[in-house]
Image (tube, grey):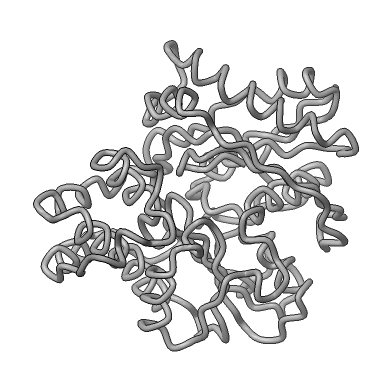
Amino acid sequence: MSGTSLDGVDAALVLTDGARILEFGESTYRPYTDAERTVLKAALGRWPGPGLEAALAVTQGVHAEVLSQFPQAQVVGFHGQTLAHEPQGRGTHQLGDGDALAEALGRDVVWDFRSADVALGGEGAPLAPFFHFACAKRIGATEPLAFLNLGGVGNLTWVDPRRAAPEEEGALLAFDTGPANAPLNDLVAERLGLECDRDGALAARGEVVDGALELFLEEGYFRRMPPKSLDRDDFSLMMDLVRELSDADAAATMTAMAAAAVMQGMEHCPTPPARLLVTGGGRRNPVMMAMLSAGLDCPVEPVEAVGLDGDMLEAQAFAYLAVRVARGWPTSAPGTTGVAAPVGGGRISRI
């Protein structure tokens, strides 16, 4: 998995029958070099066509390098690098060539997970909810809970583990809450040449500017009913709203924007969740976590509190989904992407 934050590639081994998570195996992470990240950033927003050769070479090369460390894997789930996402317009674009990767690895590769959902009227995102449902079952949850992924974009999954299957009506509700780490990363990169606001150190020194926060929350996206999804750069106005602020105040305000977006999203949950389990890089930001805890009525905890790996959950999700695709089972449903009926996405490149 390589997400919109462009930090690198995660890979994780999962033993699954496509319904249950039987065992979590080893995992690894390969950060992008500065040069690789520059190439991928230059390709963001691009649709299929000429001029993407360098970005494709980076995507294919790094994924092949990482996945070669897992010779025991019987099937590979390859998400590719999201460059553009416009489900009600031009579609969705994850850069990557599953046929070439299967040939390089000598193993079957499942890829292009989102296109079928979008073609049938779905948002194509988020796709981790079916895996979140399996995680809720694995940890023995007995009442509704929610998973929050704070990556480049934030996404929320409300899960009712009392249901028998993820595609069952009422089992899941999922949607993108709003921007999360991506605009904050862009801010500190532009102003300070840093990759991220590590440990929320910059935001901790600043103050939230309420006027900018209020203008942010006027964005029409927050009034839309879920399921709904975002592209990495849909909230480009965030940078304009903090343009005149000091570095610390801008970071604090952007962090508050991401947290406030989650709070708005939680209002859509069918019933209040018993707990909110946070995954993705944002869970390492104590300022973000403190803002969420202060603004929500349920406990807010990193997924490690229930024995899951917040760094690898997204990669594990696409390993799990690859097996579902191979078995011809659904990977999204009306409650997760707004698609008309449960649908199994993904193409399989066989060796």
Which residue shows up at 82% across the image and 61% down it? 21
Position of residue 242 relative to residue 94, above or below, is: below
Q: Position of residue 203 (x, y in %)?
A: 30, 62
Q: Quadrant of residue 38?
A: top left
Vertically, is 33 above or below 240?
Answer: above
Depth check: give the residue in front, 238 or 129.
238
Q: Nearer the viewer, residue 48 or 91?
A: 48
Q: Position of residue 87 (x, y in %)?
A: 43, 43
* Residue 219 % position (x, y): 22, 59
Q: Left or right of 196: which side holds 251?
A: left
Assign the C terminus to one quadrant of the image.
top right
Q: Is residue 259 left or right of residue 248?
A: right
Q: Is residue 26 above or below residue 30?
A: below
Q: Residue at x 32, y 48 (%)?
A: 183
Q: Is residue 236 above or below residue 277?
A: above
Residue at 31% x, 70% y is 260
Quarter holding the N terminus is top right
Identify the residue at horizontal 58%, vertical 25% (top origin): 59
Q: Is residue 330 left or right of residue 46?
A: right
Residue 293 picture location, percent across and down = 42, 81
Q: 38 or 96: which is nearer to us?
A: 38
Q: How many marks?
A: 0
